[in-house]
Structure formats: structure tokens, C-alpha cells
């Protein structure tokens, strides 16, 4: 796996390290040696159609979803890389391992969805509607949901995700009440979403 710097032209001060599992070393990338696992993504078309069925609709995304998932220490060495620290000699770089799931590794989406669903299963008895919402209304890290009484579901979804180390941000509901309940600012964040 290779690392490199990446700069967003819209955020010139922020520099981000990119871990590229598709970069080739010796003619082969790390992704060639990892199983991607099954595709657990829900159909985006189905999600968008169901999104228009309720009175109250909202969307949000999980902040840095992959980086919230820790890799077992015995598996972290697959994500090992060399790095030249300031005091390193030319032929003796430092060796590091990444202890979190990284974006770009072909198995990351499958693992993230599995962990997200496994965490939600713990709340099946306590929050059955919110548990099903977590499991059925995510597309990657985006939560896309509508229903008739969403204020309670929204706060329960937040609670379920928080228990698994996930934080939902950038909420955009069509209801000021739901937005305030989620701790958002009604003046600038609210968007108009028309549902059937």
C-alpha cells in the first residue's frame, strides 16, 4: 500500500494523507491479495423511491465511517507501510501499521456495512424501527430515510450509531422540529424536500 499527500483545491491549507491500496508495487496492488467480500450496498434506486413515501424526510452521513472501525492487531500488518521520519536514515525508514479501516481497500465497504448492521442488531429489542432504519436505509455512509413520525426514529438512529462509534453529521431534514431535535441549526441547514 502506498501513501501520498493529497490537497483539495477548495481547502488549500488542509493536507490529507491518502493510503492507496490500488497503487502497484512490483506490478501488483494490495487489493489483488484481499477478498472484497459480498456487495452489501442497498439499491440506490430503491432507497430514493422509498425516500419519497413519508411526510418527514431526512438525510445525513457518517463522519469518516471507515476510520471509526479498528482492525485487529494481527490483521493490521496487511496495512503496513514505510515512512521516513525526520531522523530516519536513508536505508532505515520507520515501519508503521494503520490500525483503522482505510478507504480504498476493496473489502472496506463490506466490512463497514457488516459492522454497522451488527451494531444495530444490539438494539433490536429497544429500538426496533430505528434498527431496521439503520440496516435498510443506508447507502455506504449516507443515511436516506422518510416516514410519518421521524423525530423519534432520527434520535434513536443517532443513539445506535453513537454506541458503535459512528457520528452522523450534515443532517438535512424537511422539518425544523427534527433538525432541532438532532442539534442542527434551523436557519442555514434546513432544505426543502417534497415527499409524496
Image: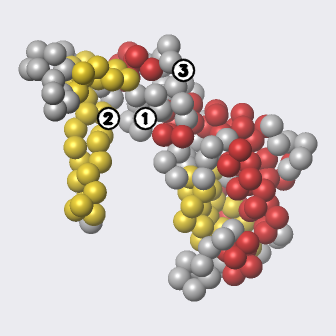
On the image, numbered disc 3 is attached to which residue?
Answer: 72
Q: Is 95 or 167 nearer to us in this picture?
A: 95
Number of the label disc, if any, that sits on residue 102: 1
On the image, numbered disc 2 is attached to which residue?
Answer: 19
Dot 1 or dot 2, earlier in sequence: 2
Q: Classify 28 as above or below 135.
A: above
Residue 23 in view, yes or no: no
Q: Farthest residue in the front direction?
A: 87
Mark 2 closeness class: few <14, some 14–19, many ≥20 residues within 10 Å: some
Q: Is 147 or 179 nearer to us in this picture?
A: 179
Of helix, strand and loop, which one carries label 2?
Answer: strand
Left or right: where does residue 67 sit relative to residue 172? left
Q: Residue at x 69, y 81 (%)?
A: 176
Mark 1 closeness class: few <14, some 14–19, many ≥20 residues within 10 Å: many
In percent of width and height, residue 73 lies at 50, 18
Alpha carbon of mark 3 to alpha carbon of mark 1: how far? 13 Å
Amino acid at each position: 500500500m502506498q501513501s501520498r499527500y493529497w490537497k483539495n483545491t477548495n481547502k488549500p491549507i488542509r493536507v490529507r494523507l491518502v493510503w492507496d491500496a490500488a497503487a502497484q508495487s512490483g506490478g501488483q496492488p494490495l487489493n489483488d491479495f484481499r477478498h472484497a467480500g459480498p456487495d452489501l450496498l442497498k439499491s440506490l434506486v430503491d432507497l430514493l423511491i422509498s425516500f419519497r413515501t413519508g411526510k418527514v424526510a431526512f438525510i445525513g452521513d457518517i463522519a469518516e465511517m471507515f476510520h471509526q472501525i479498528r482492525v485487529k492487531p494481527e490483521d493490521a500488518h496487511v496495512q503496513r507501510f514505510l515512512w521516513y521520519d525526520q531522523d530516519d536514515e536513508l536505508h532505515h525508514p520507520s515501519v508503521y501499521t494503520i490500525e483503522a479501516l482505510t478507504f480504498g481497500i476493496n473489502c472496506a465497504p463490506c466490512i463497514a456495512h457488516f459492522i454497522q448492521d451488527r451494531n444495530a442488531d444490539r438494539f433490536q429489542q429497544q429500538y426496533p424501527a430505528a434498527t431496521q432504519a439503520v440496516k435498510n436505509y443506508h447507502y455506504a455512509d449516507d443515511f436516506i430515510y422518510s416516514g410519518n413520525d421521524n423525530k423519534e426514529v432520527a434520535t434513536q438512529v443517532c443513539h445506535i450509531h453513537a454506541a458503535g462509534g459512528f457520528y452522523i453529521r450534515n443532517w438535512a431534514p424537511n422539518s425544523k422540529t427534527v433538525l432541532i431535535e438532532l442539534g442542527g441549526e434551523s436557519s442555514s441547514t434546513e432544505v426543502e424536500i417534497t415527499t409524496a
